[in-house]
Amino acid sequence: MSTYKKPTLDKDLDKLSYMEEAAGSLGRGLVAPGIALLFIALCGVVAGAYVLGAPGGVVIVAAAAIGAYMALNIGANDVANNVGPAVGSRAMTLVSALIIAAIFESAGALIAGGDVVGTISKGIIDPAYVSDPTVFTAAMMAALVSSALWINLATWIGAPVSTTHSIVGGVMGAGIAAAGFSAVNWLTMSSIAASWVISPVLGGVIAAFFLAIIKTFIIYQDDKIKAARRWVPILIAIMAGAFAAYLAMKGLKKIIKIDLQVAIIIGAGVALAAWAITKPLIAKQSEGLENRNQSLRKLFGLPLICSAALLSFAHGANDVANAVGPLAAIVHTAGIGEVAAKVTIPLWVMAVGALGISFGLLLFGPKLINMVGQQITKLNPMRAYCVALSAAITVIIASGLGLPVSSTHIAVGAVFGVGFFREWYTERSARRIEYVNKKNGGKETKLRPVRNREEQARRKLVRRAHFMTIVAAWIITVPAAAILSGVLFFGLIHVMG
């Protein structure tokens, strides 16, 4: 019995085909890093043209490249929290989310981004301890590089971390390396450390609260559509009011200064208007819908898209300073030759931050978007709505109480809150059991006992591995960035000195 053998030429052609496929796959993987490197180089060139012949030109060019790298990492990691829930719930596609977030992030940074920032990043270190321009410049560069590297590592392992905490750790570490522990404002640091707990817990509780309202008053009602016509306009009004107050107080602070009381009044007015507008719209949209949960998801789609855009705008307005604050400080110090407590951010520096965040999101954002939106717990439009609403309300509450919070911790904490509440509600809710009994014709429903650990783990609605990874990354962000920054500072001061 003879066996067919491929001719040698066919084998060689197959090998060439495999090699071409492998080379093509490798090439596609290098496109995003290549574009990122090109952007970093372009920022250095633009900075060089801007400061041509000025004092400290070389330092400014290097700082511009580092600031661009930092902005890319913020876009890759931090922005995912704004659009991840909407993508995970399938209210919008990944491509549309990337485009919307990039546009509104840039708009928020350029239109409403803070034009004055504290060079010592929220008063973490005393300017008197780093009054020497060379020492200060080295400290700010070390803070930028260390925080960017840490965020890059966190993105690579799939952990959404706070870019604010990263830069705080970088500044603290460089300050300690430059002037010792006495240079650090430990009261400020303790309040920042408190936000590690406050932000995710508050975000999770608020998200769970609104999910409980949706489940109780809409999902587990006999006539879901009738209940939705009553409650969805109210929920949308709450979201509209919360975002109006959030943007008035935080996102528009460069254009006009608005205190908490005025912001709440603005939010209440917008909420009332939103309820009056959406009530007839929801009534019309719900016509002909079947009395099931799948129908309810259609009613939350548009509010989720709007929330993703508004969160991106506010994030760009507030967090762009994480990338360009130290860069603006370096530009001022290198150009003027003195350390200032506050500096104005030049337009070209703000553009580096805005464009860098957008490029980072487009090139590297999908990984963290999928993590936040799909891998922690399963989201649908109702659950994603609770996450988005929680993000706005938590910031307003925290601002009113004077508590420092992290937008990353709030959003991810809200996702965890939704997931853990679903676990509790599924197993223990008397309202749900009553609803299921009614569906079963009055037959009593009993929860199936968990027989082994494997089955218990399978029935959990929050992936514990992701929970532990993210919490661990949150805990070590500040010390990791601080240690790395301190090491880099000694190297930079040696080179610059």
Image: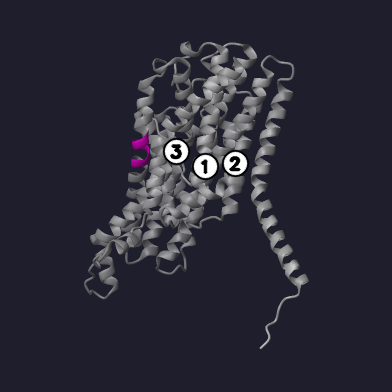
Q: Which mark is residue 407?
A: 3
Q: Which residues are magenta?
A: 196-201
Q: Kindly report the distance in space between the C-alpha atoms of the residues bearing marks 3 and 2.
A: 18 Å
Q: Quadrant of the C terminus?
A: top right
In-front residue for pair 421/261: 421
Q: Position of residue 255 (x, y in %)?
A: 55, 27
- Residue at 68% x, 43% y is 34
Question: Is there CB contact under 8 Å for labels 1 and 2?
Answer: yes
Q: Position of residue 122 (x, y in %)?
A: 45, 23
Q: Which tag, 1 or 2, sits closer to the chain's start?
A: 1
Give neighbour class at mark 3: few <14, some 14-19, many 20+ (Cα, 10 Å). Answer: many
**Local secondary structure at mark 2:** helix
Task: Kindly identify which residue carries mark 2.
Answer: 360
Q: Kindly report the distance in space between the C-alpha atoms of the residues bearing marks 3 and 1.
A: 12 Å
- Residue at 44% x, 38% y is 407
Q: Main secondary structure of the magenta part?
A: helix
